[in-house]
């Protein structure tokens, strides 16, 4: 089964099969060292730049800002959900996220 992924509304949403699924309006908790030195870093996403699938994990490139230290940088390959039995299952932004390395394994 093919899953259609794209960004919508100037990067405000990730669309899965033409349905808005993940928004930049949430604060994401990122593990130590992934974005800045805060542990964890609470990052307000400003825009999604790209979206892709790595194995069964849906990853997004985004831009965000840490609410504690103010670091504003790109985020590469942020796991935002996964594909299970042909269905998209989003990760909650409150969950501690990590980078996905090119082989599909969490770092």
Image: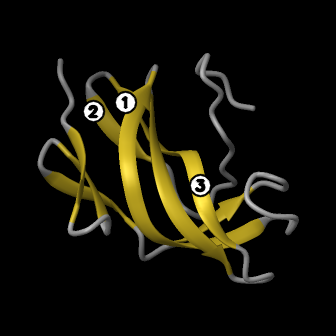
Q: Nearer the viewer, residue 74 or 89?
A: 74
- Count neighbours of disc 1 (C-alpha within 10 A) and say few if under 14, some if 14 to 19, many if 20 or more: some
Tell me if residue 14 comes above or below residue 105 in the rendering: below
Label whose residue precedes the other's in the sequence (3 or 2): 3
Tell me if residue 38 comes above or below residue 48 in the rendering: below
Asked if labels 2 and 1 touch by Cβ distance under 8 angstroms, the answer is yes
**What secondary structure is found at the residue carrying circle 2?**
strand
Location of mark 3 (residue): 75
Q: Position of residue 90 (x, y in %)?
A: 41, 48
Residue 83, numbered label: 1
- Residue 92 vs residue 101: left or right? left
Q: Position of residue 81 (x, y in %)?
A: 45, 43
Q: Position of residue 101 (x, y in %)?
A: 65, 27
Q: Quadrant of the C terminus?
A: top right
Q: How far apart are the alpha carbons under marks 1 and 3?
A: 21 Å
Q: Nearer the viewer, residue 77 or 87?
A: 77
Q: Position of residue 23 (x, y in %)?
A: 36, 66
Q: How far apart are the alpha carbons under marks 3 and 2?
A: 25 Å
Q: How far apart are the alpha carbons under marks 1 and 2?
A: 5 Å
Count the labels in the image: 3
Q: Quadrant of the N terminus?
A: top left
């Amino acid at each position: 089964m093919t899953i259609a992924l794209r960004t919508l509304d100037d990067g405000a949403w990730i669309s899965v099969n033409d349905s808005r699924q993940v928004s930049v309006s949430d604060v994401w908790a990122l593990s130590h060292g992934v974005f800045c030195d805060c542990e964890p870093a609470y990052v307000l996403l400003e825009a999604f730049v790209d979206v892709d699938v790595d194995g069964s994990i849906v990853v997004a490139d985004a831009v965000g800002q840490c609410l504690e230290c103010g670091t504003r940088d790109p985020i590469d390959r942020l796991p935002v959900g996964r594909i299970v039995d042909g269905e998209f299952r989003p990760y909650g932004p409150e969950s501690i996220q990590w980078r996905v390395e090119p082989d599909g394994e969490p770092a």
